[in-house]
Image (cartoon, rainbow, N blue to C red):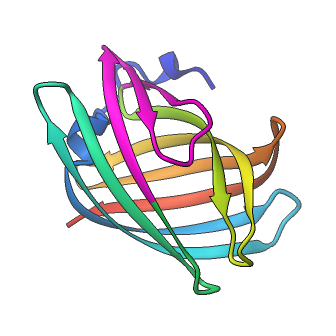
Amino acid sequence: MAIDAFAGTTPVFLPEQFFVGRFEGWAVVESLVGGLLKRATIAAHGELDADTDTVVLTETYTFDDGHSDTLRWTIHKTSEGQYTGHENRLEGEATGEQAGCALHWKYTRDTPQGDGKSFKLNFDDWFYAIDDRACIVRGSAGRAGIPFATAHVTYRKL
């Protein structure tokens, strides 16, 4: 998909608006060949520094096997429709493109697993605004550019 396909769609998804405040979420991760791999609940909150167009977002995923993973994002709007992100377990930086109701977000992260190991995974996420309080994410995770799992995530602002 090309981000330009979403130009003019509403509601507009802007990270600097949506990710401010408290929200909750739910996720399922499925194998590409079928089958549920993981389930998670998400608790998150974000704050905006309007002077720098930067959102500081903390989200904690609590997985069905009992382990959790907390991400502390700094998301910066670099120009109209363009974003970068930093998080302490990233390789390099995240990049995002936004148009209309969608945000395309890509990054590589050393991701902790329930067994105590961690894996460097490539993420390719599409955020879609449903309304001003909800969005749905369809993402893929893989290694060496080859996806092996799909995530479905729902966020709701409180």
Residue 17, quarter of the rendered image: top left
Q: Nearer the viewer, residue 49 or 22?
A: 49
Residue 119, quarter of the rendered image: bottom right
User: Does residue 85 belong to the magenta stretch?
Assistant: yes
Please state the extent of the stretch shown in magenta in the rendering: 71-99
Whether residue 54 sits left or right of residue 32 in the image: it is: left
Question: At x 62% / y 48%, what residue is drawn?
Answer: 139
Whether residue 142 sits left or right of residue 50 in the image: it is: right
Res 11 visible: no
Q: In the rendered image of this protein, does residue 136 appear above or below residue 79?
A: below
Res 150 visible: yes
Q: Name the image quarter holding the C terminus.
A: bottom left
Question: At x 81% / y 72%, what residue is drawn?
Answer: 35
Please state the horizontal and vertical placement of residue 4, each as a whole percent of the image. Answer: 49, 16
User: Does residue 49 belong to the magenta stretch?
Assistant: no
Q: Residue furthest top?
A: 79
Q: Residue furthest left?
A: 51
